[in-house]
Image (cartoon, rainbow, N blue to C red):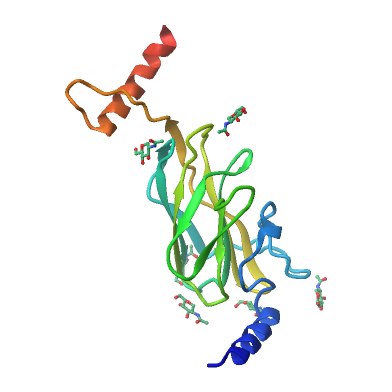
Amino acid sequence: MNKQFLILVFGLNLHAVTAYTNGMVTLACTSMTPNHRNNTASILKPPYRVTTDVSKYTAGQVIKVTLQANETGFRGFLLQARDETGPVGTFTVTGNDAQLLNCGTAGSAVSHTSNVNKSTIVALWKAPNNNNTDIRFRATFVQNFSLFWVDVQSDPVRFVGTNTTVTSPHGSSPSVSLTIYLLLLPLLAII
Ligand SMILES: *[C@@H]1O[C@H](CO)[C@@H](O)[C@H](O)[C@H]1NC(C)=O
Ligand SMILES: *[C@@H]1O[C@H](CO)[C@@H](O)[C@H](O)[C@H]1NC(C)=O
Ligand SMILES: *[C@@H]1O[C@H](CO)[C@@H](O)[C@H](O)[C@H]1NC(C)=O
Ligand SMILES: *[C@@H]1O[C@H](CO)[C@@H](O)[C@H](O)[C@H]1NC(C)=O
Ligand SMILES: *[C@@H]1O[C@H](CO)[C@@H](O)[C@H](O)[C@H]1NC(C)=O
Ligand SMILES: *[C@@H]1O[C@H](CO)[C@@H](O)[C@H](O)[C@H]1NC(C)=O
C-alpha cells in the first residue's frame, strides 16, 4: 500500500468514524467528551468495562488497568485516573493501539492511535509518591461517530498508605512491613 492511499483511506474515515482518528485528543482532557458535532454521550448501559488488578494501593504503586469490550469493539478511547482534583499519576502503554497524552502532566492520559476496532486495551498506571487519595479510572469509549460513552468508571481504588522504610531486624518482607505499619496507625492516633 502506498502512502497516498493510506492518507486517502484515513482521510475518509476521519469523517465517517471520529473527528480525531489519531487520538490526539488533549482538547477533551477535562470533559473527556468527543466533539462529534451535535452527538451526545449515550445514556445506555455501556458495553465496555474498566477494571483494575487491585482494589487498593500505596504511594508509587503500579496498577494494571484494562479496558474491555463486551461484544462490539471500540474505535476511540480516552483513559485517565482521577481524584477530586483531576487527572493524577503516570501511565505507560505497550503495543501500537495506545499512546500517552499530556492532560496536565506527561502521561496522565491514554488514547487510541487509530480508529481500528479494538476489544482490549491494557495500560499500567503508576501512583504519585505524594498527596494520594482514593481514585477511580475513568474512560471514554467511542464505538462510532454518533455512539460513544463518557465517564465509564472503574470501581474505586482506595489509597491505603505511604510505604514506610521501617526495616525489621529479622528482615521481614515489604508487605509485612506495610501490614505492621497499618496495624500501628491506630496506636499512633491514640498517642
Ligand atoms: C444533528 O445534525 C444533523 C446534521 O449534521 C441533523 O440532521 C440533525 O437533525 C441534528 N440533530 C439534532 C438533535 O440537532
Ligand atoms: C454482554 O454481551 C452479552 C451477549 O450479548 C449480553 O447478554 C450481556 O448483557 C452483555 N453485558 C453487558 C454488560 O453489556
Ligand atoms: C510502594 O510499594 C509498592 C508495592 O507495594 C511498590 O510497587 C512501590 O514502588 C512502592 N513505592 C515507593 C515510592 O517506594
Ligand atoms: C470489533 O471487535 C469486536 C471484538 O473483537 C468483534 O466482535 C466485532 O465483530 C468487531 N467489529 C468489526 C466491525 O470489525
Ligand atoms: C502536595 O500537596 C501540598 C498541599 O496541597 C502541596 O503544597 C504540594 O506541592 C503537593 N506535593 C506534590 C508533590 O504534589
Ligand atoms: C453507530 O452504531 C449504531 C449502533 O450500531 C448505529 O445505529 C449507528 O447508525 C452508527 N452510526 C454511525 C455514524 O456509524
Return the x and y of residue 70 as percentages of the image width and height: 46, 67
Return the x and y of residue 186 as percentages of the image width and height: 39, 16
Farthest left residue in view: 170
- Report the side of 144 relative to 180 (left or right): right
What residue sits 43% from the left and 39% below the top?
60
Farthest front residue in view: 3
2, 166: nearer the viewer: 2
Return the x and y of residue 135 as percentages of the image width and height: 52, 41
What residue sits 47% from the left and 72% below the top?
71
109, 66: nearer the viewer: 109
Quadrant in the picture for residue 25: bottom right
What residue sits 61% from the left and 92% below the top?
5
156, 162: nearer the viewer: 162
Vertical relation: 183 (above or below) 69: above
Quadrant in the picture for residue 10: bottom right
- Report the side of 153 relative to 174 (left or right): right
Return the x and y of residue 129 as percentages of the image width and height: 47, 35
- The picture quadrant for ligand 3 comes to top left
Q: How many labels were placed on the picture?
A: 0
Vertical relation: 96 (above or below) 46: below
What residue sits 61% from the left and 54% below the top?
102
Q: Quadrant of the C terminus?
A: top left
Quadrant in the picture for residue 58: top left
